[in-house]
């Protein structure tokens, strides 16, 4: 069977995308290979088709159990002999699968880098032979990537037991020159062939919305969700606690959408994470509030928007997460709610317990994100230059080039006539009540717009809104009712 025949027989496709055919041929010819391909460009096919054609087992090193399970399920649906080993399986099931691997039942075996260090596992692989070792999401191997795990450094030693060294292939969506060099060196790839495509996704519109405070962030978040009502999206936050906090706030202020949203983070029990991922993938919920633990390798084509509630820690992280939108090629949107104080959270998380060159490099990456998000020039060209790729001559995929960035952020997302009418009523209330009170003791502009959106029906509901307290509500509730509720 040829690669073209395998493509049609197993995947129902008639043509390869560039440079899939060249990458497949490189692996089949025995060359170590590194591929840098944007999210949604078909990286998995590049090692799955060689796995079907090579004589022995292909071992795929994957960073996440959920990712392994998802890919194996898709392969098995196509009649491909693929399985995985993980700590979530019972001891008996793990033993059975190892026996099946030794007996040659499987063509693809997915596992974590930690599994590859186990002597029993190594002995089984040595007995059956490996044709190809794949490192998926290969940025995880690098200290200069954004998800470094030391076990990846031990891969070359772990495969040294093989009588015949397998082809070593590595795949990632985004990597700087320094990360690329570190990947090839850490994997001890022999004169690797490197393939790359420009990382720029021309169907995703990049937007940055500066926010002065938490109330304004929530207001913008509500407006964006109303604008994308009924569509599928992801909200990325910096901490596990924030997934719960943002979920609770949105369920409070957008009760009509509450059943269509949930949260996800790496600290949840495996069964809970699997359940929430399945709910999102199947469309039972349309909005996921998640940490960076969600999304790597997830193949959901109809994500229409990605919102960064907190800024990302690096441009690699930013563009990988943005790239989870629009995988079907249709127009999609990325928004960053930019609040200066939020960078303190990133500093605390990402600079802790680092020293020397790694500390300085992490600082540099944070600085590059700040320059990108606060800069006035084309975001698309900055991202291309960061990844040492040719910058596009023109851009219609960022708010700088679309001349939107200089507009008032609140005006950029104000769309509904009804909301404008509510704000006018509240402004009138403030003017009349403000005859005897300091204007901003009554309500700020952000508070007024939040009230116009949420329209709390009781004093208790008003107290729960960010930026409002019991004292404020007790003093002004009767007056605000007259203009807003009636």
Image (cartoon, grey):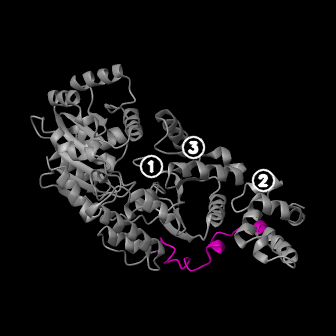
Q: Quadrant of the N terminus?
A: top left
Horizontally, is 160 left or right of 232 in the view? Answer: left
Nearer to us: label 2 or label 1: 2
Q: Is residue 224 above or below residue 138?
A: below
Q: Secondary structure at mark 3?
A: loop
Disc on res. 461: 2
Circles 2 and 3: CB distance less than 8 Å? no
Q: Secondary structure at mark 1?
A: loop
Q: Secondary structure at mark 2?
A: helix
Q: Earlier in the sequence, mark 2 or mark 3?
A: 3
- CA gap between label 2 and label 1 equals 34 Å
According to the picture, the residue beneath numbered tag 3 turns out to be: 283
Nearer to us: label 2 or label 3: 2
Horizontally, is 177 left or right of 367 in the view? Answer: left
Q: Which residue corresponds to the image point at 65% horizontal and 72% vertical from the top-left? A: 410
Nearer to us: label 3 or label 1: 1
Q: Earlier in the sequence, mark 2 or mark 1?
A: 1
Q: Is residue 23 magenta?
A: no
Circles 3 and 1: CB distance less than 8 Å? no
Residue 268 location (% of width, % of height): 49, 39
According to the picture, the residue beneath numbered tag 1 turns out to be: 295
- Mark 3: few/some/many CA within 10 Å (<14, 14-19, 20+): some
Disc on res. 413: none
- CA gap between label 3 and label 1 equals 15 Å
Residue extent of the magenta highlight: 396-419
- CA gap between label 2 and label 3 equals 30 Å
Q: Which residue corresponds to the image point at 49% horizontal and 33% vertical from the top-left? A: 271
Residue 439 location (% of width, % of height): 78, 77
Residue 292 location (% of width, % of height): 45, 52
């Amino acid at each position: 069977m040829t690669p073209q025949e395998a493509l049609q027989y197993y995947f129902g496709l008639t043509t390869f995308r560039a440079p899939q055919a060249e990458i497949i041929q490189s692996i089949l010819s025995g060359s170590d290979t590194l591929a840098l391909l944007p999210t949604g460009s078909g990286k998995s096919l590049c090692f799955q088709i060689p796995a079907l054609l090579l004589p022995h087992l292909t071992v795929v090193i994957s960073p996440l159990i959920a990712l392994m399970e998802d890919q194996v399920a898709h392969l098995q649906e196509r009649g491909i002999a693929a399985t995985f080993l993980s700590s979530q399986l019972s001891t008996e099931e793990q033993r059975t699968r190892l026996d099946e691997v030794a007996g040659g039942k499987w063509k693809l075996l997915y596992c974590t880098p930690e599994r590859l260090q186990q002597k029993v596992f190594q002995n089984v692989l040595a007995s059956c032979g490996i044709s190809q070792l794949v490192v998926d999401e290969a940025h995880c191997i690098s200290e200069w990537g954004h998800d470094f795990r030391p076990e990846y450094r031990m891969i070359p030693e772990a495969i040294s037991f093989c009588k015949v060294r397998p082809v070593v292939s590595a795949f990632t969506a985004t990597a700087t020159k320094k990360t690329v060099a570190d990947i090839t060196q850490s994997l001890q790839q022999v004169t690797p062939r490197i393939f790359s495509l420009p990382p720029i996704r021309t169907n995703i519109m990049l937007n940055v919305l500066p926010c002065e405070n938490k109330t304004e962030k929530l207001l913008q978040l509500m407006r964006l969700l109303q604008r994308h009502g009924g569509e599928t999206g992801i909200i990325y936050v910096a901490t596990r606690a924030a997934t719960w906090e943002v979920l609770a706030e949105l369920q409070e202020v957008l009760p009509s959408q509450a059943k269509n949203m949930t949260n996800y983070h790496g600290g949840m029990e495996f069964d809970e994470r699997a359940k929430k991922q399945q709910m999102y993938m199947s469309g039972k919920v349309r909005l996921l509030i998640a940490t960076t633990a969600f999304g790597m390798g997830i193949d959901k084509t109809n994500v229409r928007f990605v919102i960064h509630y907190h800024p990302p820690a690096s441009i690699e992280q930013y563009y990988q997460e943005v790239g989870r939108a629009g995988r079907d090629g249709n127009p999609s949107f990325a928004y960053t709610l930019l609040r200066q104080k939020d960078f303190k959270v990133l500093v605390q998380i990402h600079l802790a317990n680092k020293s020397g060159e790694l500390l300085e490099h992490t600082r540099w990456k944070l600085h590059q994100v700040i320059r990108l998000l606060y800069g006035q020039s084309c975001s698309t060209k900055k991202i291309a230059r960061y990844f040492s790729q040719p910058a596009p001559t023109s851009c219609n995929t960022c708010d700088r080039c679309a001349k939107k960035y200089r507009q008032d952020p609140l005006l950029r997302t104000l769309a509904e006539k009804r909301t404008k009418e509510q704000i006018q009523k509240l402004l009138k209330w403030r003017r009349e009540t403000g005859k005897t009170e300091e204007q901003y003791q009554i309500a700020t502009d952000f508070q007024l717009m939040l009230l116009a959106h949420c329209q709390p029906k009781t004093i208790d509901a008003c107290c729960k809104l960010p930026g409002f307290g019991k004292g404020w509500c007790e003093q002004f509730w009767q007056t605000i009712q007259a203009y807003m509720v009636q």
